[in-house]
Image (cartoon, coloured by chain):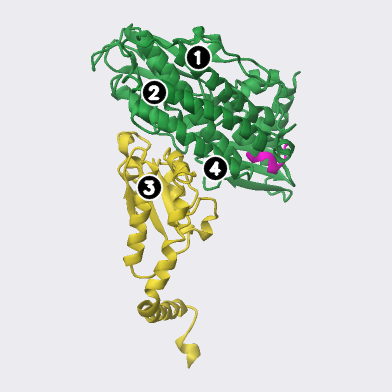
């Protein structure tokens, strides 16, 4: 009987149903605690797409030190990361790599688009090799404006993302 | 036959052999970048035999934004902001040679005080660039103190530049005809204080980083590029000077006020990775020395900018002007057809010249030496991609 019900073709349906049931059971009592744990351990991927990487490096410097707000330095493997900061211009050569890195990251994952180029294409809007914004490649959560944004602006964007995670449902 | 020709033949032979027996189990393909804690906007395709690199192919062009084509659709003043974006932390130097070229095409001379202010901004930007480079070199070699110290001291110089120009890294300060605005009140004293402090810190860098036995072991005798090879490969800047060639554009073809300044061209004869890591540090020391002289000799009164109309027309003709940037000779070749826009603009960058030497240094060395060799080439990927 059970063999007829569960076979290799429909097993994933049961697994996803089971995960839905589990999430529903966990959401109500533990949702806040899980999100609280997530917001102070944002690991960014080290993928530099443009020149805002200089200001991203300055944000990890002793003066600004984003680590004290819960955004760690970008030295980890992408398999343990949950944040991708798109650092500036996304070119035609970089866009498939950006998508590939995003797809390889485990859930939950968040995206910050840093700089005018990552938002709309910025100064390079009329260039033949630049995409008009990173949101055509990956879903963006927070936009950080500036060309390049000051480290303080990046920290504010980090706060906005934490606020967003706090209010969202767990995945 | 020189050693370089031998090496080129060897690399070609290996490349043919590798394509022949591609499914050989001895060789392993590695693709380092663009998602990698060190590589940045850049990828190196490497084949290793055990621990030794037998084939290396730098794959550039991840940030190619078509600057040269874009500048044909903008006039000479509108070109400034996007042309400084390739090296945002050395932005005065990359615009410096553009300003010199446009000044030659239009036929104007900046006022003397403007020339001094521009040179001071360029030298401060060289410090900002080199400290960032040194910080990343610290990360590459697993020396995190060397990331924290230079990035911390760099902020003090950035403060100085922010007072001077109005923005942290992308200043758009140097324009054709001088600089955009005069230096603020009390700038001279502030600048001298910071430079004195920075020189003190440089001595500490030497103690903790360059005299560190670990760094010495990892860099001394690694990636040898002798004088003849360096000249043949066409490398420039600190990489060329580390191979024993005292070549500096500020000395060879002095621009603006550099012929009045007394400074030495820093170079080393050991030709290895340690020399390539140490020459930028010596350049920083020399920059402090130059800034002090510039502040001393700068006239107190006078205009800083020769005003030109916004839509200025250039004389038909062509020009090539270059400056010594943080990475080496940085030149602009501009053809003008007498209109308000450049007919053709070509940027010749130091990074692109230096990366050509990477396969020759990597083949034959160990995989563990790759980060030390690569970043000591003083390479900034965005500048090479333009």
Disc nearest the viewer among 2 and 3: 2
Residue B355, percent from left and from top: 58, 30
Q: Is residue B370 magenta?
A: yes
What is the C-alpha distance between the residues marked 2 and 1? 15 Å
Q: Colour of chain B?
A: green
Q: Position of residue B77 (x, y in %)?
A: 29, 20
Disc 1: which residue: B293
Residues packed near mark 3 inside 10 Å, few (<14), some (14 to 19) or many (20 plus): many
Earlier residue among tags 4 and 1: 4
Is B193 placed left or right of A134 in the picture?
Answer: right
The residue segment tinted magenta is B364-371
Quadrant of residue B337 in the image?
top left
Decide whether residue B32 is among the magenta residues.
no
- Secondary structure beneath dot 1 equals helix
Q: Is residue B334 in view from this perspective?
A: no
The residue carrying mark 3 is A154
- Name the chain under label 2: B
Q: Going by the picture, which residue comes out furthest to the bottom? A: A1
């Amino acid at each position: 009987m059970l063999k007829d019900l569960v076979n290799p073709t429909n097993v994933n349906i049961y697994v996803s149903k089971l995960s839905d049931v589990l999430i529903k059971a966990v959401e109500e009592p533990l949702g806040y605690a899980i999100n609280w744990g997530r917001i102070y351990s944002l690991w960014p991927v080290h993928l530099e797409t443009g020149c805002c990487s200089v200001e991203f490096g300055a944000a990890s410097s002793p003066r600004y030190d984003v680590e004290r707000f819960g955004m760690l330095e970008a030295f980890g493997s992408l398999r343990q990361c949950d944040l991708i900061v798109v650092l500036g211009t996304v070119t035609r050569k970089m866009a498939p790599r950006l998508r590939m890195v995003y797809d390889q990251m485990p859930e939950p994952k968040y995206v910050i688009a840093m700089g005018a180029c990552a938002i709309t294409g910025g100064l390079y809007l009329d260039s033949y090799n630049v995409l008009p914004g990173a949101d055509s490649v990956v879903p963006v959560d927070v936009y950080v404006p500036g060309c390049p944004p000051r480290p303080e602006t990046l920290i504010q964007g980090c706060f906005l993302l934490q606020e967003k995670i706090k209010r969202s449902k767990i995945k | 036959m020189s050693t370089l020709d031998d090496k080129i033949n060897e690399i070609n032979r290996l490349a043919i052999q590798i394509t022949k027996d591609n499914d050989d189990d001895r060789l392993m393909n590695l693709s380092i970048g663009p998602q990698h804690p060190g590589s940045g906007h850049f990828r190196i395709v490497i084949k290793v035999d055990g621990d030794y690199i037998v084939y290396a192919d730098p794959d550039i062009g991840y940030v190619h934004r078509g600057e040269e084509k874009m500048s044909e659709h903008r006039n000479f003043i509108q070109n400034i902001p996007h042309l400084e974006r390739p090296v945002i932390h050395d932005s005065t130097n990359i615009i410096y040679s553009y300003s010199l070229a446009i000044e030659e095409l239009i036929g104007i001379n900046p006022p003397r005080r403007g020339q001094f202010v521009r040179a001071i901004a360029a030298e401060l930007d060289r410090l900002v660039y080199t400290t960032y480079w040194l910080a990343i070199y610290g990360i590459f070699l697993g020396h995190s103190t060397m990331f924290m110290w230079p990035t911390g001291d760099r902020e003090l110089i950035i403060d100085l530049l922010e007072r001077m120009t109005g923005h942290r890294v992308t200043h758009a300060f140097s324009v054709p005809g001088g600089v955009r605005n005069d230096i603020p009140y009390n700038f001279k004293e502030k600048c001298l204080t910071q430079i004195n402090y920075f020189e003190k810190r440089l001595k500490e860098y030497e103690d903790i980083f360059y005299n560190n036995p670990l760094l010495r072991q990892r860099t001394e005798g690694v990636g040898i590029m002798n004088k003849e090879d360096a000249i043949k490969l066409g490398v420039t800047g600190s990489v060329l000077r580390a191979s024993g060639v005292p070549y500096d554009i500020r000395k060879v073809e002095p621009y603006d006020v550099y012929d009045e300044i007394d400074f030495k061209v820093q170079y080393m004869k050991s030709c290895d990775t340690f020399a390539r890591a140490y020459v930028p540090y010596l350049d920083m020391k020399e920059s402090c020395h130059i800034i002090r002289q510039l502040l001393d000799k700068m006239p107190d009164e006078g205009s800083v900018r020769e005003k030109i109309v916004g839509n200025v027309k250039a004389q038909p003709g062509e020009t090539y002007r270059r400056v010594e940037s943080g990475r080496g000779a940085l030149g602009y070749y501009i053809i003008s057809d007498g209109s308000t826009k450049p007919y053709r603009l070509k940027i010749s960058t130091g990074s692109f010249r230096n990366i050509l030497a990477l396969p020759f240094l990597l083949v034959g060395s160990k995989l563990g030496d790759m980060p030390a060799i690569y970043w000591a080439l003083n390479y900034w990927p965005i500048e090479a991609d333009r």
